[in-house]
Structures are given as C-alpha cells and as structure tokens.
Image (cartoon, rainbow, N blue to C red):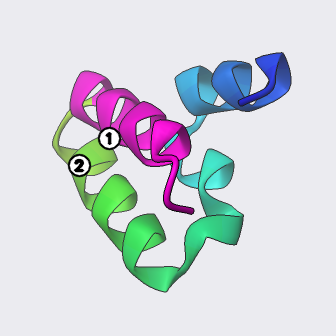
Amino acid sequence: MSFWRVLLSIICPPLAVLDKGCGSIIIVFLLWLCGWVPGVIAALVILNNPNN
C-alpha cells in the first residue's frame, strides 16, 4: 500500500478503492455517507487485504 493510496483514502475513500471492484466501491461509499471515519476505516481495510 503506497503513501498516495493512504492519503487518498483519508481524503476521499471511494476514490482509493476504484480498482478493487464495484462491491468495494459501493460499500465504502455508503459507509462514507454515514460518516467520514467508517469510510476511511473500510477503505484502509480493503487496501490492506492481502488477497486482492
């Protein structure tokens, strides 16, 4: 995970997971709408997943 991905996930989480698939984008976007912190946490978890 690069520094720029982490920075992008802090600023705008849905943009950080664009290449991870439609489901990830939708989940992060909905959590981001509920609050900034849940969206950031979800984006960082998805980016840290070693299976992707």
Outermost residue, front side: 51
Upstream in sequence: badge 1 or badge 2:
2
Outermost residue, bottom side: 22
State if disc 2 and disc 1 touch (CB < 8 Å).
yes
Q: Is residue 51 above or below residue 44?
A: below
Q: Quadrant of residue 39?
A: top left
**Image x and y of residue 2, in percent:** 80, 25
Q: Quadrant of residue 29?
A: bottom left
Q: CA distance from mark 1 to mark 2?
A: 8 Å
Residue tagged by mark 1? 42
Q: Is residue 43 magenta?
A: yes
Task: Decide: few, some or many residues near mark 1? Use Cα within 10 Å; few <14, some 14-19, many ≥20.
Answer: many
Task: Decide: few, some or many residues near mark 2? Use Cα within 10 Å; few <14, some 14-19, many ≥20.
Answer: many
- Helix, strand or loop at mark 2: helix
Residue tagged by mark 2? 31
Q: The N terminus lies in which quarter of the figure?
A: top right
Region in magenta: 36-52
Residue type marked 1 = Ala
**Left of 4 or right of it: where is 45?**
left
**Image x and y of residue 19, in percent:** 70, 68
Q: Quadrant of residue 4?
A: top right
Residue 30, disc? none
